Amino acid sequence: MLQHVWERARAARGIDELVVATDDERIASAARAFGANVEMTSPDCASGTDRVAEVARRRPQAAIVLNLQGDEPELETAAVTRLVEAMRSDDSVQMGTVAHHEPDLGVMASENVVKVVVDAAGYALYFSRADLAGASRGGPALRHAGVYAFRRELLLEFASWPPGRLELAERLEQLRAVERGVRIKVVLGERPFAGVDTPEQMAVLERRGPAPVAAGG
């Protein structure tokens, strides 16, 4: 699964360096076996964002940092490219993410599927596991994907903040930023892609295989 994410991320345009950050030597060994650059991080990291921030601290030249989670084997390469372009083209965008329209409305009722609603300018209003804004009835909510981009300064500040009330209630780390007034730009993907959060989702992916790698956009 991690190799699928790596290959899709490597095909995206605009990424200067790609690193697998982990505190588990088993993951590190597997990643090195398929040619990935690996950095070991502290086992005390409470989240993936904390892990990414630790690696970013070692790279003062990294102005924009992406957090691509290892459980997104169908990651859309073109969407990652557009996210990078959105961050590079507008210095006012401090944080960005990816979402897409979900044609299978039945899946939008699941609390394992994260929803996001956006404002007229394309910034996130709220993220939720609930059936937000009538998502399962064709409402305006989009399906959120676990892809994030940060300006370096915001990433390091974000990692220093304690979890907020909304984050704890929804179990969604990005709400830590929303609670503090950070505007999160939402880049629209061209096709649905799903992360693997449950054994059932993993079984479905294994039966049909991951989607083909998309073009870089």
Image: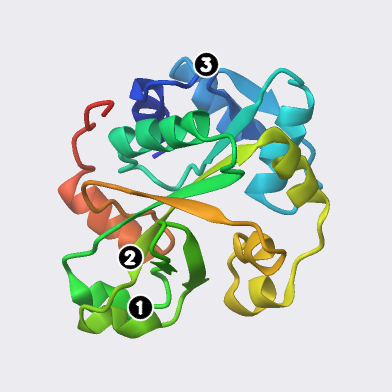
Q: Is residue 88 visible?
A: yes
Q: Amino acid at mark 3?
A: Asp
Nearer-the-camera pick, 78 or 6: 78
Number of residues whose C-alpha sits closer than 10 Å to that of mark 3, classed few (under 14), some (14–19) or many (20 or more): few
Q: Residue at x 67, y 24 (%)?
A: 39
Q: Amino acid at mark 2?
A: Leu
Q: Closer to the observer: label 1 or label 3?
A: 3
Q: Where does label 2 land, which residue?
A: 142
User: Residue beneath label 3, please?
Assistant: 16
Q: CA distance from mark 1 to mark 3?
A: 36 Å
Indicate the position of residue 139 as horizontal and vertical percent values: 26, 79
Labelled pair 1, 2 in contact (Cβ < 8 Å): no
Is there CB contact under 8 Å for labels 2 and 3?
Answer: no
Q: Nearer the viewer, mark 1 or mark 2?
A: 2
- Residue 110 badge: 1
Q: Position of residue 211 (x, y in %)?
A: 20, 41
Give the mark nearer the N terminus: 1 vs 3: 3
What distance separates the C-alpha of mark 1 from that of mark 2?
A: 13 Å
SS label for mark 2: strand
Question: Is 136 situated left or right of 29 in this image?
Answer: left
Q: Secondary structure at mark 1?
A: loop
Residue visible at 41% across and 57% down in the picture: 121
Numbered circle sitting on residue 193:
none
Amino acid type at circle 1 is Ser
- Could you say which is closer to the camera, residue 91 or residue 74? 91
Image: 142 above or below 212: below
In terms of sequence position, does the residue under pointer 1 or pointer 2 come before the other? 1
Could you tell me which quadrant the N terminus lies in?
top left
Asked whether the beta carbons under mark 1 and mark 3 sit within 8 Å of each other, the answer is no
Q: Residue at x 36, y 35 (%)?
A: 82
Q: CA distance from mark 2 to mark 3?
A: 29 Å
